[in-house]
Every structure is written in structure tokens, then in C-alpha cells.
Image (cartoon, rainbow, N blue to C red):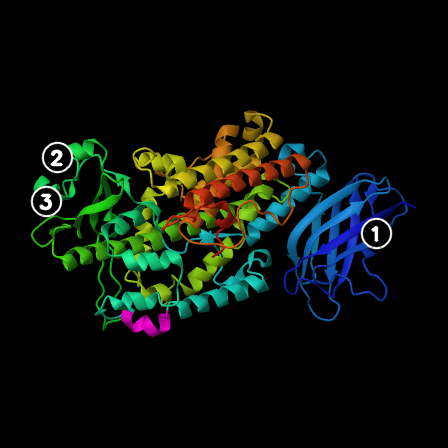
Amino acid sequence: MPSYTVTVATGNQWFAGTDDYVYLSLEGTAGCSERHLLDKPFYNDFERGAVDSYDVTVEEDLGEIQLIKIEKRKYWYQDDWYLKYITVKTPMGDYLEFPCYRWITDEKEVVLRDGRAKLPRDDKTQILKQHRRKELETRQKMYRWKEWHPGFPLSIDAHSHSDLPRDIQFDNEKGIDFILNYSKAMENLYINRFMHMFQSSWSDFADFERIFVRISNTISEYVMQHWKEDFMFGYQFLNGCNPVLIRRCTEIPKKLPVTMDMVECSLERNLTLEQEVKAGNIFIVDYELLDGVDANKTDPCTIQYLAAPICLLYKNLENKIVPIAIQLGQKPGPDNPIFLPSDATYDWLLAKIWVRSSDFHIHQTVTHLLRTHLVSEVFSIAMFRQLPAVHPLFKLLVPHMRFTIAINTKAREQLICECGLFDKANATGGGGHVQMVQKAMKDLTYNSLCFPEEIKAKGMDSKEDIPYYYYRDDGIKVWEAIKSFAEDVIHIYYESDEVVCEDVELQAFVKDIYVYGMRGVKASGFPKTIRTREKLAEYLTVVIFTTSAQHAAVNFGQLFLGMYPDEHFVEKPVKEAMEKFRKNLDEIVNAIAERNKNKKLPYYYLSPDRIPNSVAV
């Protein structure tokens, strides 16, 4: 009788193994096997990290194996099991791989297809079409859209982390890691000790230094020594944690009535201010978004303030960007003066501190929360709802969605919720951060997520004119590497633009993002459909870049770009594309390391070996 060798790999996560009964059935083109209990005498099956093999004998050859059914039944108590993959060696000696990479909970069953990626058009048999359809129907019931606040991108319908599907919850290690990192951050920043400082005035600049007492490295020490200086203030707009706001100034706005007399002592080329603007040497950062946002009033005993500054910057003869004028409000007038470097030392320093405070609020709420976390959650939900596990784009994108929905759900539970950390330690807490996201949605466009386009739109694309903008230089290299990888994968599975148009699952994925993520707003520029391979490559690059590199540039991460420990793809051409991708990333890592040698302020946020695959922190 024909015999199949079945190999089962259990995950390495904590508590991934199970003592439950595990049954397997094979379904082929010529018939189905009986249900087989996978069990070896006097052996502890399915231990954490184990790879176990079993012989499954059938009465007749089953033909080409199409599906594997795994059933888990309780032995003593419910014991969740993380199944990585199953391989099957057929009587003819062929090997088939069935990726799983998910938890099997309760007394449930999982039906797996072999790991070869397939578009909807590739499925010819009714059983495969039905399996594909049923998987999406099940997922769409589990991954539901919900409005957390009016005007926000829609998010997952879950009140707490424990309400999420098991497969996207933090695993035990990640959950503990989240708690430890959170606690460590509180300890390192002396948050508990300085909480009273957030709710009262600070009396001494030494208070700032005390915050950094436990954060000691070369960069932080250099910043502590030079944070008051104009060159450091300007440098942070290029290569700090929020390098996305600065733009080339093409015309001095009327709401900032700067005159030549005010800034003449700051200009170094014997040109008028108007001539400097025309020469491309003037830059601007405008915090208009903060105008009208309510300051935190959660503590009636503490008055908090917000500013909406406009900062004018100048590229000097050393090609350094330095501030030359700051106005702390949007409406000019006697009670809203323009501060200058020629003012009294502490007047100028305090003006810069107000700008940096406003930059913090935009960074945390818009650059970080909205434009990476919330947008990435939209991509994640749409992927789970519209792309089955066998779809090549699911296999491509799923590593970049790891823990994203979980971390956002945690944030809604603990960080940005009412009485959360934002309310306790942030001047935009108590609802101001919600207003900011609602206002920022109008600027959340598809083109603004296309990295090279956004850099160009801000007039910041010239390396010759702005030589020290490492965020731009490294970001474009990473963007191109991701795009090249996406193109390679697309050309394996989509032989023409027509195939792209015919992919109903892809089109449903794109539509979900437009309708629910962008709330169907036409002005967002997000496409409703994708009709060419070129546009698909750009779209996938936007998704991957946003969930990995863009988040890394404004935050930090753990599992790095190009690392795919879960082998969702099994085909050789895709594995070759992955290897090419990793080599391209290694070249970028080496180039960045070489550039950073002997720099007092090295920039490494977009070095691929420091870019997390997904928004997971």
C-alpha cells in the first residue's frame, strides 16, 4: 500500500508545543485518506522546536496532494499549538511543503495548501477554489473594520489585545518583551520621578540633563553638549527623529513678516533675503497643524500650552542648515514677535525650545502614530481580509505586518486612550492628539507615502544643494532596493498587465485600503484599482517601505529588513529574488557604515540592519 512520510515542525516560541491529540488527513486529486492520529509510542510528540516525522499508509494512491487537514483534539486541557509547516514525501519520492505559521487553538482544524503561491486564475479545481473562498470568508468575520474616532483611518474591531485573533496577538516572548521594554523606558527616563515635572514648570536647564542621566552613548553625549547651538537645532530637521517637515522655501509667507533688516546679520552671501530665497538657500518648517489644537486640561491644577510656530532656516556657506527667524504663532502682530539669533541668548534659546516642543507633538502624533502605525494597520487588516495565504502578495507582505495590529491595539488600550500615558505626560493629551490626527488626514495622500515623490515635492531632492540630508540619501537607497525586490516578485507571478487587472483579490485589497483606510476620500490620491505591473510595484513598495523603513526612521525596531524566518514562499525563483534583495541591502549597510566612519553624529536609522520588518514597537 502507498505510504507517505509526513514531517511536522513545531514553532520555537514559548509554549508552542502541545500535548493534545493531532490528526492528519490527506486530500488528493484521486481521493482522500482516512484521519490518522500522529503519535509515536513512548515519545513526546510536538514539543517546542521539534521536527517529527510519521508514516501515513493509505489503501490507494491519492494522486496529487492538494490539501492537508490538521485536527487538534483535547488530551487533558486546551493546549494551543504553533504549527510552522508540514512536508509530505509522496510514494514517488516527491517533496511537498505546506507552510502554516499559525496557532491552532481549542479543538479546531486547519486546512493547508501546498506552499506554491497561486493567483485566483491559477486554481482550476473546485476544491481549491472553494478552499480559497472559505478562507477569506472566515478571515473577513475575524478581521472587521471599526471607527475608533471620527475622521481616523478605520482600525481593527477589538476592544483589547485579548480580543484579537490568536495569530496576530503578541506571542508570550513578545508580550513580556513589551512589558519589560516599557518598564525599562520608564526607569531609564526617570518617568516616575519626573512625572511631577511634566505637570509643573521646570526651573533649571539641568533638569533636561538629569533625564538623560541613564541614556549614555556617544551620540546622546554629543547632543547634550551641543543642544543649545544653532547648527544642532538645524541638523535635527535633516537627520533627527522627525526629518520629514523641512521644505525649501520658495516664497516668504505673508503670515511671517520677516524683513531683510531682521536677518541680514545671519546671511553670509551678500544677497538680499529675496535673492537667497531664489537661490534656494532658505528653508521653512511650519507647524500650522497645531494652530487651534486644545492643550491638555486633564489636570485642573496645571496649565499647559501649545504653540504653532513658523521657523525660517538658512543654508550657510558651510552647507549647514541654521535657524534665522522664529515666530511662535500663526498670526503676526505685536503680541507675536519674531525671534532672531541676535536677540538675548535665553530669548532665542526659549524660542527654539518651543519649536522643538511643537516638533515633538507633530512627530509623535502625525509622523509616527498616523503615518506609520495607523496606516500600517490599514494595510494589515486589508491584507488579512482580502488576500488568502496562498496568494503571492500575502506571502510577500505578511512578514511586514507582524504584530502591527497588536501594538496598535495595545496603544489604544494604554497610550492614546482616555487617561492613558498621553493624557498624563503630553501637552496634546486630553483630546488634542485626536484633533491633530483628524486635521492631518487631509495631508495623508498616496504621493506623500511615495518617498522619492515626497522628498521632491518638498524641494529637498538635490544632493548637491543639501549634501548632509542622510535621511533622504539612505531612504532613497532603501526605497529602490525594496522596489527592485517587489518588481522581481511581480514578474514571477504576473506575466502581463492584464493578469494584474484580472486579479480580483488584489483589486479587493486595494479597494479595502481606499474605502476603509482612506475613508473613500478622492483627494487622498490612493488608487481604487491597480492596472499595471509598474503601478503594482510602486504600490507594494509604499506598503513595505511605510511598515519598515519609514517607521524605523522615526522609531526603532527588532526583526530587521530582509530577514524572513517564516518561509511562506517555497519556489526557487522567489528565494533567489530574496537573496538578491538581501545582497542589495548589505551593500547599503556597508555604504552607510563607510560614510559614518569618524562622524561625530553618524546617521544609521535607515541602515537596513536596523530597519525592522514591521511596525511592532
Is 191 magenta? The answer is: yes
Tell me if I can see residue 257 in this picture: no
Q: Gap between marks 3 and 2, in whole Å?
A: 11 Å
Question: Judging from the image, what secondary structure is the residue with disc 1 in?
Answer: loop
- Residue 197 spot, x, y in % from top left: 28, 71
Q: Which percent across, then down, holds residue 83?
A: 69, 55
Element under disc 3: helix
Residue at screen point 42% across, 42% down: 595
Q: Is residue 313 left or right of residue 239?
A: left
- Name the residue at the front extreme: 598
Principal SS element in the magenta part? helix
Q: CA gap, disc 2 to disc 1?
A: 86 Å
Q: Compare residues 150 and 583 and report the one nearer the observer.
A: 583
Is mark 3 in CB contact (under 8 Å) with mark 2?
Answer: no
Identify the magenta region. Answer: 190-197
Q: Are marks 3 and 1 in contact (CB under 8 Å)?
A: no
In the displayed structure, does residue 147 sit left or right of residue 363? right
> Which residue in the protein does label 3 denote?
262
Query: Looking at the image, which is closer to me, 484 or 367?
Result: 484
Amino acid type shown at disc 1: Glu
Residue type at mark 2?
Thr
Residue for badge 2: 272
Relative vertical location of residue 20 with respect to residue 330 in this rendering, above or below: below
What residue lies at 32% left-to-right and 35% top-to-bottom? 457
Residue of label 1: 34
Q: Earlier in the sequence, mark 3 or mark 2?
A: 3
Identity of the amino acid at label 3?
A: Met
- The answer to whether residue 247 is left or right of residue 332 is right
